[in-house]
Amino acid sequence: MTRLLLATALLLASTLSAASKTLDIYWADVEGGAATLIVTPAGESLLVDTGNPRPDDRDAKRAFEAAKLAGLSKIDYLLITHFHGDHVGGLESLLKMIPIGKFLDHGDSVEDNAGWKTYLKLSEGKRQSVKPGDRIPLKGVDLRVVAAHGAHIAKPINGGGANAAICKDAQLGKPDPTDNAQSAGFLLSMGKFQFLDLGDLTWNKEHDLVCPQNLLGTVDLYQVTHHGLDQSSAPQLVWSVKPLVAIMNNGPRKGGHKQVFDTLRKSPGIQDVWQIHWSELADKEQNSPEQMIANMTPTAECKGHWMKVSVEPNGKFTVTNGRNNFSKSYQAR
């Protein structure tokens, strides 16, 4: 009887431990590029972009440090949202630091640039292109591609639907012929929690995701598109998905534009905007409180502090600033 009770207690403890594991998302500071690491409760990993090419391997090292912080010895999937240097440039150096299982992308580049050529060589035999509606098979979460190669999902998901009120005053920009507009974007769900990352998708493509129908529904966490440049974060997109929290992976003078801060602050229900860098392109009043900014100093003095979100099974998620360990918790809708 004692052995049976002990075995039952151990099984219960093991079950509770497994159930309490968090979904963790890390933002490495790549000075206005992108390197977002997702680690599921099951321990599977997806790195989204690899930062800039650097002679000192700065961005690759910072992405690798995030992987070490997460306790990873390999990265299961790498998603390159598009083939600009600030997103794919750190790949060659990163591969010398940690193995990567499978390479995912939006399809062939629409630009003949160095990043694309290098990616083709490095991903040979392991590459797979995704399309809207595809799922990336990470255990414990639902990660659905919502945009890729200039296309988007055809029907609303996540409670989306008709969106006439917000769309009636929408203004479009000039068509974007660059690979930004081809970006692969996704919606990640775990229970109540929803996280949206659209890479560098530009204004008109964002508009198409929410007008005339909101294809995305509402989200809890929004990675501010395109580092907070005003070529993206169309008001219709931001105000339709209504994030509770936004995280901007900007640099001191790359992204963090005034117009984007204004759009975010006016979004219905938003509680906080967190920044990887203090923005020198916005007013002091537009920047977030210092405790919510990972790096306060210019590039030459920057220590490359990270940011992290941990999501619990009940939908509670906590943002932590790696510079000062300040954290704040929120509850998913």
Image (cartoon, helix red, strand yellow):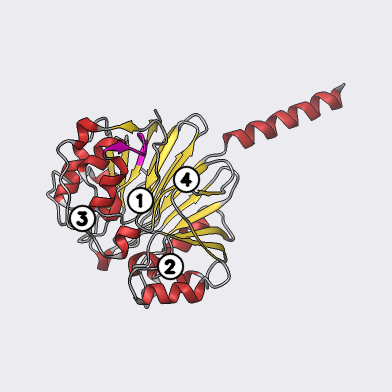
**Residue 204 x/y as whole percent:** 24, 51
Mark before the other along the chain sequence, 1 or 3: 1
Query: Could you tell me which secondary element the residue under label 4 belongs to?
Result: strand
Are dots 4 and 2 in contact, CB under 8 Å? Answer: no
Give whichever of 206, 79 is nearer the camera.
Answer: 206
Left or right of 70, for residue 149 = left
Q: Which residue is mark 2?
A: 60
Rounded to the nearest whole Å, what is the CA distance between mark 1 and mark 3? Answer: 13 Å
Rounded to the nearest whole Å, what is the CA distance between mark 2 and mark 3? Answer: 26 Å
Are dots 2 and 3 in contact, CB under 8 Å? Answer: no
Q: Is residue 248 above or below residue 108?
A: above
Q: Which mark is residue 231?
A: 3
| Range of residues picked out in magenta | 212-221
Rounded to the nearest whole Å, what is the CA distance between mark 4 and mark 3? Answer: 24 Å
Left or right of 307, for residue 72 = right
Mark before the other along the chain sequence, 4 or 1: 4
Q: Which mark is residue 235?
A: none
Q: Quadrant of residue 158?
A: top left
Rounded to the nearest whole Å, what is the CA distance between mark 4 and mark 2? Answer: 26 Å
Q: Is residue 279 above or below residue 83?
A: above
Mark before the other along the chain sequence, 4 or 3: 4
Q: Which residue is mark 1?
A: 198
Q: Is residue 314 visible?
A: yes
Residue type indicated by callout 2? Ala
Q: Which residue is mark 4?
A: 144
Residue type indicated by callout 3? Gln
Magenta: main secondary structure: loop
**Residue 310 x/y as whole percent:** 46, 41
Magenta segment includes 220: yes
In the image, which is nearer the foreground, mark 4 or mark 2? Answer: 4
